[in-house]
Each structure stands twice: as structure tokens, then as C-alpha cells.
Image: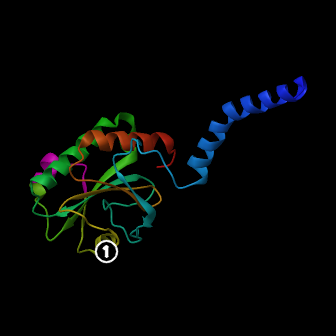
Amino acid sequence: MDKRTKGRLQLIGLAVLFIGPVVVAFWLYYGSDWRPAGQAAHGELISPPIELPDNPLQAEGEPRLRDVWSLLIVAPADCSNACQKALFETRQFRLALGKERDRVQRVWIVENGIPDAEFLAAEHPNLMVMEASASVGGDLISKIDRSSEVDIYVVDPFGNLMMRFPSDLGMRGMHTDMKKLLKLSKIG
């Protein structure tokens, strides 16, 4: 083999050695369904997102699931310890968002009754409440796949149910995921 051929083979070998892994990584990430296992998401992504109904005849003060990020807390009216913990942690999580907190609203979809008004006024003054027995609340409940007594969901500003948080997750996991969503999204 002459010097020229040997030099070309070395150049091709070096190119494959340095560019090859980048091409393979790009193909694995964007060209296939494989994703790295160590992703930082704490919530469970709902794929495909579920479009939720919006109330066209919305009364003053009722929650509207458009134009703002919404945390849906689905729980019974007789708020158990798990329900109270979820309400407290979502309140604290929203406060921890700082200047971004106005982009997120909390909505409690109440099943099986009417919640204690004194408890809500004292502990959760900015919490919006929607009864599951109402037509819109019933439509929402029918579209949600319930997994426990208390469920927490994220609704994007277009009205799509797109993420579910386990009820035992805690504020830190929700905060991390929502900070990323709000940082990447300029809507809502």
C-alpha cells in the first residue's frame, strides 16, 4: 500500500472515530423511540394529551381551563389527610414559583359532596373549586383516568391534560417539573 492510500485510510478512520458516535447518538435520540433512562421528570407524561372541555357559559369566579396553566386536584369533598396534604403542597408549590405563580392556577374538582367553606376560606383562599356533579366537572372526571383517592394533574393553557403527578410525590418534584415547563413555554 502506498503512502497516499494509507493516509486516506487513516483520515477516514479518524473521521469515523470522532463523528460516528455523534451520528449514532443523534439517530438513537431523534430517529428511534429510545430515550435515556435518567430523565429528570417526576410527573408522568400523558401521551397523547387529552383535550378537556371548557365551560362556554362560565360564571364569574369559576375556573377556566384555558389561557393559564392549571393544577387539577381531584379528590372527594370529605377532605382526608391525603387530600389536605395535596392541597397544602400545591399551595406551597405555587407560592414557591415566585414571579411565575400568576401563570398557574389551582383547581379542586370535588367529588361526592360540597367541601367545607370555612376550611377553604381560611387555608386556601385562592383555590378554585369545581363540583364533579356539574356538567363541566362531570365531563372532566369522565376523561381522567383515576389511579388513587387524590390525583394531581397539569393542564396546559390550551386545555390539554398533559401530566399526572403521583399523590405521594411531594412539592419538590412538582416544583422541578413545573419550573421546566414554565421556563420552556412562553404561553399561559
Residue 52, horizontal then vertical, whole percent: 40, 67
Residue under the point 38% across and 72% down: 57
Q: Circle 1 sits in a helix, a strand or a loop, which is it? A: helix
Residue 126 among those drawn in magenta: yes
Say which amino acid is labelled 1: Ser
Kindly give the residue lying farthest to the front in the view shown.
Answer: 1
Residue under the point 78% across and 27% down: 10
| Vertical relation: 153 (above or below) 177 | below
- Packing grade of label 1 (10 A; few <14, some 14-19, many >=20) is few
Residue 81, horizontal then vertical, whole percent: 9, 53
| Vertical relation: 133 (above or below) 50 | below
Residue under the point 30% across and 36% down: 96
Residue 122 among those drawn in magenta: yes
Q: Can you tell which quarter of the image residue 63 is in? A: bottom left
Residue 30, horizontal then vertical, whole percent: 59, 49
Q: What residue is shown with label 1? A: 142
Pick whichever, 8 or 129, lies toward us: 8
- Residue interval drawn in magenta: 119-128
Q: Left of 30 or right of it: where is 69? A: left
